[in-house]
Image: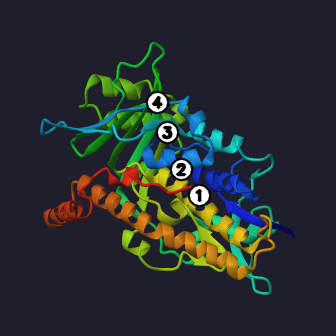
Amino acid sequence: MEVIDIVIVGGGICGLATALALHRKGIKSVVLERSDRLRATGAAIGVFPNGWRALHQLGIDSTLRLTAIQFQRAVDVWADKNIVRETPLSDGEARCLRRSDLIEALANALPPETIRYGYQVMSVNMERSSSYSVLQLHDGNSIKAKVLIGCDGSNSVISNYIGLKPTRLFSRSAVRGLTVYPNGLKYAPEFLRLRKEKILIGRIPIDEKTVYWFVVLHWNQGDGEMQKDPASIRQRTLSLIAGFSRDIVDMIEKSDLSTLSFTRLRYRAPWNLLSGNFRRESITVAGDAWHVMGPFLGQGGSAALEDAVVLARCLSKKISDANVRGSIMELSGQKVMEALDEYLNERRRRVFLLSLFTYLRGLLLVDDTSFPLRFLCIIMITVFFRDSLKHIQYDCGEL
């Protein structure tokens, strides 16, 4: 059985960022990715100042700035009520990155053979004699790890093993995609959110010819049948937005089918993030495996990048204090668990507040939310999130 210092399950944004943060601190890790190649489901991701601070610590911010233009403001439009609200984003950097650009930048910065493709983890157990975790793989093989980090998304095998409460489902789903305009975009460099008849449409330019868009709509029981058919996804989306302006319809009609995705929105209840144990022995979680949240703040990806920086910093500090030359294997199990607890304690309040704010925003978006509950959401946002942009100014600190 192969024995590895640190195993990271999941080769998405969080998994690769965690591996890169550890690499920057001289700590080796292995990423197990179940797919046979890099995954970039979701088309694109908005990155705000807090996310760029984390990318700077990872050393790939300069490369990624070349791939996307900066947008200066958010514009919210309630078409049914003829209301328009503009929010300047002048204090800090905001860009929309193709997920493929971000994933590739993370992967390219890692040492060769860090990522292992086609490794699907089926189950996890603890070896009592050593407190190592034992991963059972789809092909029947096993791997033993001193430290195991679950970055395997909302349906995480690792979070289930740790005992996290199940994720919940919003009554909403999201369609995401990219549209390329060969002759150039006519849109301003802004984040547009357009609401009309129970549908939310978002649009952000990535570069001079490419725009990222998403449509948030009510989930119907039969929608699951079209999840893997891009042509069906586009046709279904077009049928639902028929009453929108011609430029919106045209954007979706001309979308790149290869970039389309359709997902039911999930979240982990904010109150479950206040308490509970997110570590079991030397196993913990990060990113969506810990705190999957709705897209209503656009912070899921940036929060995962923050997790990566803080987790690597905490492990590195314990190694430095123990003077064991960057080797997790030489660090006692007790010191490893202390490092993981420090990471969780530092991140807990941050992820709780992000999850709560996102949850409240999501409830306000859902039209079947009762009036008393909507009123309570407004009160809580007013009391706890008076500065609606404070969360994007967060600094996760240096590696």
Q: Quadrant of the N terminus?
A: bottom right
Name the residue nearer the viewer: 182 or 139.
Answer: 182
Circle 4 is placed at which residue position?
206
Separation (CA) of disc 2 from disc 4: 20 Å
Q: What amino acid is found at the position of numbered circle 1 in the picture?
A: Ala
Q: Secondary structure at mark 4?
A: loop
Residue 12, given in percent of the width and then of the height, sits at 61, 51
In the rendered view, would you say 183 is above or below 222?
Answer: above
Q: Secondary structure at mark 1?
A: helix
Q: What amino acid is found at the position of numbered circle 4 in the picture?
A: Ile
Circle 3 is placed at which residue position?
44
Q: Residue at x 79, y 70 (%)?
A: 324
Query: From the viewer's perspective, is the residue at label 1 or at label 3 nearer?
Result: 1
Q: Earlier in the sequence, mark 2 or mark 4?
A: 2
Mark 2 packing: few (<14 Cα in 10 Å), some, or many (20+)? many
Separation (CA) of disc 1 from disc 3: 19 Å
Mark 4 packing: few (<14 Cα in 10 Å), some, or many (20+)? many
Residue 354, given in percent of the width and then of the height, sits at 38, 60
